Image: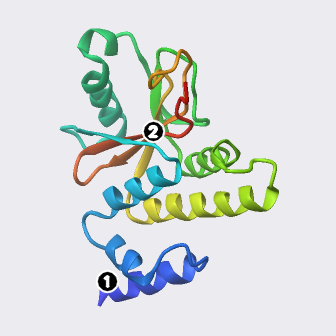
């Protein structure tokens, strides 16, 4: 019964026809965050990095991610911020958590960078709505968010790197929102 009610709620909230009914129903199960993360990554034409951590505390999850991604010695040099107000990049020692409202805003700002025709406002608007739908469903599924301002992902410059935190399964997923095309 709860699954049916949540499915109807999700369909009502996100009625942009972005997701088919079977996709919405899959959101309700325990793999929702993983599924939605991979869908969001496809939108950004990006890979998903994933890390298993040993905490459900969001800031501790980001700290453990840093150790797994960069090694203990390098992670010791980082500053960790909680509930940061922007998706930082180009701050070589800054990682942290994001408020959910900031995650929605910052991720949707990346739409012009990935649009086929960034000069077409209608295409950018549709892409922004799709992105907001994905992030909204992640929030409804229990995801928390973070960022890695140190990530360069093969570039000589930092790129916006979103961390999606699954506190129940203790997993950190990373998506490069503006991956390097060099």
Residue 46, position as x, y percentages in the image: 46, 43
Classify mark 2: helix, strand or loop.
Answer: strand
Above or below: residue 23 compared with residue 72: below
Q: Residue at x 57, y 25 (%)?
A: 89
Q: Which residue is mark 1?
A: 3
- Reply above or below: 21 against 162: below
Which image quarter: residue 133?
A: bottom right
Looking at the rendering, which quadrant does residue 17 occupy?
bottom right
Quadrant housing residue 140: bottom left
- Residue 107 against residue 130 in the figure, above or below: above
Tag 2 and tag 1, C-beta contact below 8 Å: no
Of 121 and 174, nearer the camera is: 121
| Rendered residue at 24%/14% (across/down) | 72
Residue 42's tag is none
Q: Is residue 81 visible?
A: no
Give the percent coordinates (x, y) of residue 91: 55, 17
In the picture, measured across the screen, residue 64 lies left or right of residue 4, that is left
Colour scheme: rainbow
Residue 55 can be seen in this image: yes
Task: Please identify the quadrant where the N terminus is shown.
Answer: bottom left
Q: Is residue 17 left or right of residue 58?
A: right
Q: Which residue is mark 2?
A: 146
At label 2, counting other C-alpha atoms closer than 10 Å, the crowd grade (few under 14, some 14-19, many 20 or more) is: many
Q: Residue at x 39, y 75 (%)?
A: 23
Which residue shows up at 45% across the image and 38% down it? 146
* 2 or 1: tag closer to the N-terminus: 1
- How far apart are the alpha carbons under marks 2 and 1? 28 Å
Quarter occupied by the C terminus:
top right
């Amino acid at each position: 019964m709860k699954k049916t009610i949540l499915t109807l709620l999700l369909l009502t909230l996100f009625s942009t026809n972005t997701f088919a009914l079977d996709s919405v129903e899959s959101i309700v199960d325990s793999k929702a965050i993983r599924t939605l993360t991979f869908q969001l990554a496809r939108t950004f034409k990006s890979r998903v990095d994933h890390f298993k951590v040993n905490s459900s505390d969001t800031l501790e999850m980001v700290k453990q991610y840093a150790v797994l991604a960069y090694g203990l010695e390098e992670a010791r040099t980082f500053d960790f911020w909680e509930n940061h107000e922007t998706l930082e990049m180009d701050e070589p020692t800054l990682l942290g958590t994001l408020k959910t409202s900031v995650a929605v805003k910052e991720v949707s700002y990346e739409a012009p960078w990935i649009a086929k025709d960034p000069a077409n406002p209608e295409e950018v608007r549709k892409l922004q709505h799709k992105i907001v739908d994905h992030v909204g469903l992640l929030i409804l599924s229990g995801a928390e968010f973070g960022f890695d301002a140190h990530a360069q992902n093969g570039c000589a410059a930092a790129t916006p790197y979103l961390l999606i935190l699954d506190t129940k399964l203790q997993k950190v997923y990373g998506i490069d929102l503006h991956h390097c095309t060099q």
